[in-house]
Image (cartoon, helix red, strand yellow):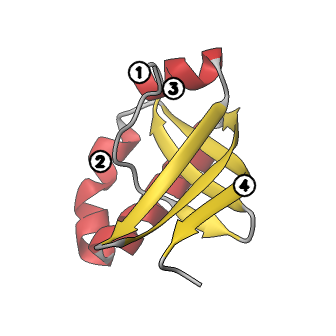
Amino acid sequence: MPHLSSIWFELEVVVVLMNTAAGRLKHRNLQRDPRLSICVVDGERYVTLYGRATLIDDWARAQADDLQLACRYNGPAKAQERAPSIAAQHRVTIRMAVTHVHARGIE
């Protein structure tokens, strides 16, 4: 059964960058099977990206990626508030190479 959860992301052309804490279910599932999908919904419109994950276990990069995502989603001030809790976790970057896109209502 696929594991589905909300997660922050950054789209870089045909690569999506995400990150999670090491050992979480998402991390363990991707270690076992690297296939994944992301669905972004806007009312009746949506886009689903399919691909394969590469897990990058580089603590410094994962910390920087998470702070960048925190800035994108919450703004710089909130990201700095979050920095100590981010630094306390072993984070892993998820790099998804997009292999297929399915969309409805989006051109």
Q: Nearer the viewer, residue 51 or 22?
A: 51
Dot 1, crowdedness within 10 Å: few (<14), some or many (≥20)?
few
Q: Nearer the viewer, residue 95 or 98?
A: 98
Q: Amino acid at mark 4?
A: His
Dot 3, crowdedness within 10 Å: few (<14), some or many (≥20)?
many
Mark 3, residue position:
27
Q: Which mark is residue 25?
A: 1
Q: Which mark is residue 84?
A: 2
Indicate the secondary structure of the residue bearing disc 4.
Answer: strand
Q: Which mark is residue 100?
A: 4
Reply above or below: 59 against 95. Answer: above
Reply above or below: 20 against 11. Answer: above
**Residue 59 location, x and y as percent?**
58, 37
Mark toward the viewer: 4 or 2: 4
As measured in the structure, the alpha-carbon distance from the residue carrying label 2 to the one carrying label 1 is 23 Å
Indicate the secondary structure of the residue bearing disc 2.
Answer: helix
Dot 4, crowdedness within 10 Å: few (<14), some or many (≥20)?
few
- Mark 4 vs 2, N-terminal side: 2
Quarter holding the C terminus?
A: bottom right
Quarter holding the N terminus?
A: top left
Q: Amino acid at mark 2?
A: Pro
Indicate the secondary structure of the residue bearing disc 3.
Answer: helix
